[in-house]
Image: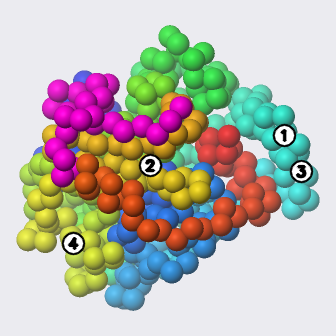
Amino acid sequence: MYGYDRNTTPTLSRMAENGLVFDDPQVPAVGTPASFTGMFSGEHATGSMEYPNPQHWREANADRTFLQEYLQHEGYYTGGFHYNALVSSSFGWDRGWDVYEDHMWDEDDSTGSGWKKNVYDILQKIDAANFAVDLKRMAGGKTPPHWETMWDDIAEFVEEAPEPFFLWVLLIDTHHPYYPPPNHHEWKQPGIRSTYAWNYAMRRYRGLVGNRRQSIVNAYDNTLRYADAFVDRIRQKLETEGYGSDPLVVHSDHGDEFGEHANYGHRPLMYDTVTRVPLIMENVGETGRVDGPTSLLGLGGTILDLAGSDERPGGQPSLLGDERDDREYVTVQNVMGDSERMAAVVSDEWKLLHHPGGNWGAKEFPEESWEAYYRPDDPMEKDNRWGEHPPELEEALMEQLNTEIHDIDSGNVDGIDEETEERLRELGYIE
């Protein structure tokens, strides 16, 4: 529905025919907890993706009210289902749910002894902990979690939840290591063991990937089509249970890069490859396409609007109807270490970025970087035209960078339980 030459999303394309498609949605931040914090609270996250540990994120979000909490107050029965450690109960994301299943404890994988944690600490000192996690998965040929393994819980919720209800499902299938079930391999990709091997190389030694890039892109496209199959299945289930005409929203919390800016995956850079995501709605009283940049900071307010509530988290207006602003620009922000910030201001024609100096797990910035891209001519953001941009956008970028934020302690990695730490290493959040 966005013009890709492969049919990766047939279900979303069907939704687009009678739904509402946003052409340029921008996430609040890059990285799952930072992005969802913004989408569910209406305010940019103050937590840092440099510190993927529970204590840090619980403190960062302690004073926020999330979408699901607003909905509970409005009388909605709420259910959340996913496999992502970064929005698990240990990170404080179980607030406001009547049913919450983060699938964090796998009977075959977890122990209470602490021995795996001690091994990780030793391997971390020689920069081999992630290699050990990937080697374990590669040797065992164990596939990553798929949405089908939590389908029964989701279906049961739809069947038994009292009305009105709010269902949130976060798929992890489009996350590396990009391995859907073999019967969903539409395009040729490596087997499971090779997939783990090349994804380790992709994350840590990006220059080695070379001509393997196309097979990784194939694998990612296969995961897109597999995730699209979930959308098809949940739509059918909702129809069967009598909810086929109720609002359905499909979106992402970040994109992924495949070498466009010396990066694979989704380190918190500010390029469109990771900040621009899909957003489509159906049964929301509007159809067609919405031009111009849209901030997903307004997602929570939009869902509350659909629920008949006057609440608007963070004061963000709904993305629907008369409330929808035709904004001149939207903002993206990631807090890094020592309260440094990466930020972007996105207009219809220009995108201005700031990256502080450092090696952010991908592209290295010897010093702070100021970048401006003219989007109509340069969608892949290769030609930095800083100095040619509209001055009002630079003022907006400086304002975003200078907004005062509360400095939050980084927390202690020792506070992460074994299963959470292994999941974070497998997903590449702990390098």
Image quarter where the N terminus lies is: top left
Residue under numbered circle 4:
317
Q: Position of residue 224 (x, y in %)?
A: 39, 37
In primary-sequence order, the first of circles 4 and 1 is 1
Q: Quadrant of the rendered structure where residue 283 is?
A: bottom left
Q: CA distance from mark 1 to mark 3?
A: 11 Å
Task: Write down the region rendered in magenta.
Answer: 366-393
Check disc 2: other Cα within 10 Å, few if <14, some if 14-19, many if 20+. Answer: many
In primary-sequence order, the first of circles 3 and 2 is 3
In the drawing, what numbered circle is on residue 125? Answer: 1
Q: Residue at x 9, y 51 (%)?
A: 288
Q: Secondary structure at mark 4?
A: loop
Q: Amino acid at mark 4?
A: Pro
Q: Residue at x 59, y 53 (%)?
A: 337
Residue under numbered circle 2:
342
Between residue 157 and residue 330, name the one nearer to us. 330
State yes or no: discs 3 and 2 in contact (Cβ < 8 Å): no
- Tell whether 58 sits left or right of 12: right
The mark closer to the camera, 2 or 4, is 2
Q: Position of residue 213 (x, y in %)?
A: 48, 18
Q: Amino acid at mark 2?
A: Met
